[in-house]
Each structure stands twice: as C-alpha cells, then as structure tokens.
Image (cartoon, rainbow, N blue to C red):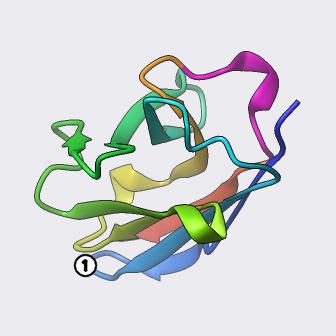
C-alpha cells in the first residue's frame, strides 16, 4: 500500500492563497496521472485537478483559472497552488492517483479553511 501524506493546509481569508504538497512513500508516478481531491463537510469527495506523467493538466470547473497542479517526480511530490480562494473551497484536500483514485491509498488529507 502506498502512503500519501498531504500538507500545507490552513486558515486563510477569502481571496488568499495556499500551496499544498503531497509526498508519496514510493514511486507511484508510473501511473497515468496524479490528482487532488477534496471533501467538504457533509459532501461527497470530489475531483479537483490532475497532472499526467507528461505534465498535462486538467481541472474541475471550480478550480479552473485559480488552482495550478504540478509534480516533481524526483521528490515523489505533487503540488497544488491555490489562489483567489473562496469560502466554498473549504474542505479536506487529498491526493491520489487519477483519474480513478485507489481506495486503499487515501492519506489523512490536509484541512483548508477559507473565511469570508
């Protein structure tokens, strides 16, 4: 089982920025893509963004234009730069493989809270 550990969350005011990181315990970057997901209170976990092994990126409509996903294979790390944050971005953020996350590999996530 691959361990994924997310970090970088915190409390920020609306309009602010945060940079999230996700470190994998082993090389999982041979998978087609890595992604970020999030789960808001009382809601289902949802897809946010993904980056392929070639560096191609895709975003959910809610993240397009505000979030940037990237990866550093040498460091086994995936990043999510988030700008222009909104209260509705408040959630626990997770990374996992994409486009279909591996149920056994969910990490603890990192809490992002955006105040209005």
Using the image as rendered, state which of residue 74 and residue 66 is in the foreground. Answer: 74
Question: Which segment did they paint magenta?
Answer: 101-107
Indicate whether 114 appears above or below 57: below
In reply to whether residue 14 is colored magenta, the answer given is no
Q: Is residue 85 left or right of residue 25?
A: left
Q: Is residue 76 left or right of residue 13?
A: right
Q: Position of residue 88 (x, y in %)?
A: 35, 50
Return the residue found at the far left: 65
Indicate whether 74 appears above or below 96: below
Using the image as rendered, state which of residue 29 and residue 62 is in the foreground. Answer: 29
Q: Quadrant of the C terminus?
A: bottom left
Indicate whether 79 appears above or below 95: below
Q: Quadrant of residue 15?
A: bottom left
Using the image as rendered, state which of residue 28 and residue 7 is in the foreground. Answer: 28
Identify the residue at horizontal 81%, vertical 21% (top origin): 104
Q: Is residue 90 left or right of residue 82?
A: right
Q: Quadrant of the N terminus?
A: top right
Q: Quadrant of residue 87?
A: bottom left
Identify the residue at horizontal 65%, vertical 59% (top origin): 111
Identify the residue at horizontal 59%, vertical 27% (top origin): 42
Q: Position of residue 4 (x, y in %)?
A: 76, 48
Return the residue found at the far right: 1
Q: How many marks?
A: 1
Q: Is residue 71 left or right of residue 29?
A: left
In reply to whether residue 106 is colored magenta, the answer given is yes
Q: Position of residue 20 (x, y in %)?
A: 53, 69
Using the image as rendered, state which of residue 5 and residue 77 is in the foreground. Answer: 77
Q: How many residues crowd around disc 1 within 10 Å: few (fewer than 14), some, or many (20 or more)? A: some
Identify the residue at horizontal 23%, vertical 49% (top origin): 63
Q: Position of residue 36 (x, y in %)?
A: 48, 44
Instruction: Identify the residue under disc 1.
Output: 15
At numbered mark 1, what does the secondary structure look like: helix, strand or loop? loop
């Amino acid at each position: 089982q691959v361990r994924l550990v997310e970090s970088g969350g915190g409390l920020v005011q609306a309009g602010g920025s945060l940079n999230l990181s996700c470190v994998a315990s082993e090389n999982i970057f041979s998978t087609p893509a890595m992604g970020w997901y999030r789960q808001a209170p009382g809601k289902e976990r949802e897809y946010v963004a993904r980056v392929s092994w070639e560096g191609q990126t895709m975003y959910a409509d809610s993240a397009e234009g505000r979030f940037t996903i990237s990866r550093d294979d040498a460091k086994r790390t995936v990043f999510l730069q988030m700008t222009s944050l909104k209260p509705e971005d408040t959630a626990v953020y997770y990374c996992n493989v994409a486009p279909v996350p591996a149920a056994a590999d969910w990490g603890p996530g990192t809490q992002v809270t955006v105040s209005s």
